[in-house]
Amino acid sequence: MDRSRPHWSYSAISQYLRCPLQYFFQRILGLPSRSIGLGLVLGSAVHAGLAEYHRRLMDQSAIDSEAILKAFHESWGEKEANETIQFRDGDTRDDGIAQGIHLLEIYLKEPPPQGIIAVEQRSLVPLYNSQGEYLETPLVAITDLLTETEGELTVREFKTSGRAYSASDVESSLQPTCYTHAIRETLGRDANVEYTVLVKTKTPKIQRIQTSRYGDDCGRLGDLVQSIQRAVDLGIFYPVESPMNCSTCPYRQQCREWGQRSNPPDKLSEHDQKPADRFVTCCNSCTSCPSL
Ligand code: SF4
């Protein structure tokens, strides 16, 4: 698979929807990100440990907790070597590592997933809009785990989170749509999506929550990506400031310096600028949307 080929991904789509200016700094200018939030480091390390565990289950090889911990620590060390970890008030490195290992331990005590078909599988698939027209740029989707039991395919997505997910968190997310679309395009079948949330509360727990997407959702995903692509082509990038977006953003300095010079209006032709609402994209705040 050609990894250099331009492509969309869930993280690119959601980053543009969250803050187009952050997207611009990272994906258009290619500015290096020299800092990373503790939550992302912990999440990546837990994912690495889970992938090691699931591969061993799939290969029917011995479950080696040392190897799982090694994968966890290697991921943590790699992030630490390349970026500065941002700690929020009261957080420490040791607490983060202990918390990640504890989450892995409680997951390993759960009944293991059955019928594993693939672990961390990367697919490059075409996108199409609601009119059935194919988009130029394809989608890359990496599924944490794909299982099949009793003839049913399930994409299993793993999250570490400071709180339990609500039903609307998964119903309104584009991530299950990306996965469902990728499975439909590669295997020609529908798949359910199950989130396994490793909840980092004082007493950590595991939450499972299911969701489904259908053909209409895949067409709507294509419509959305098509709109974002137009906006990107026209150089529409602006800051969306919020505590959630900005507190761990690695581009805060560049953002403060951002102005018209970094987003020149002469990039837009008169025709391109009208009507402006052609380029308005969904803000992904679906639970409070009056247009629902
Ligand atoms: S600091 Fe906030 S508004 Fe600025 S680029 Fe980062 S996320 Fe966007």
Image (spheres, rainbow, N blue to C red):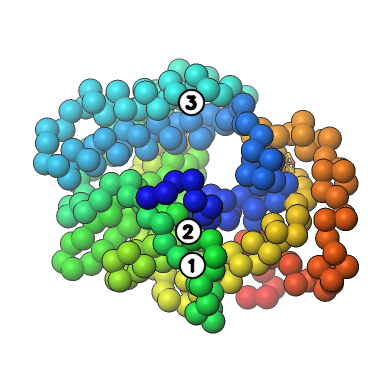
Locate residue 181: give its quadrant. Answer: bottom left
Query: Callout 3: few (<14), some (14-19), or many (20+) C-alpha neighbours within 10 Å?
Result: some
Q: Which residue is mark 3?
A: 79
Cα distance in 3D space between marks 1 and 3:
32 Å
Image quadrant where one finds the C terminus: bottom right
273 versus 67 height, above or below: below
Q: Position of residue 49 (x, y in %)?
A: 31, 33
Q: Is residue 206 left or right of residue 277?
A: left
Q: Position of residue 183 (x, y in %)?
A: 34, 64
Q: Which residue is mark 2?
A: 139
Q: Amino acid at mark 1?
A: Leu
Closer to the N terminus: mark 2 or mark 1? 1
At x 21% / y 54%, what residue is drawn?
117
Q: Quadrant of ligand 1?
A: top right
Q: Position of residue 170 (x, y in %)?
A: 47, 59
Q: Position of residue 199 (x, y in %)?
A: 42, 41
Seen from the viewer's position, the closer of residues 204 and 242 is 242
At x 18% / y 38%, what residue is drawn?
56
Query: Callout 2: few (<14), some (14-19), or many (20+) C-alpha neighbours within 10 Å?
Result: many
161 versus 289 height, above or below: above
Q: Which residue is mark 1?
A: 127
- The reply to whether callout 2 and callout 1 are in contact (CB within 8 Å) is yes
Secondary element at image label 1: loop
Secondary element at image label 2: strand
Query: Callout 1: few (<14), some (14-19), or many (20+) C-alpha neighbours within 10 Å?
Result: many
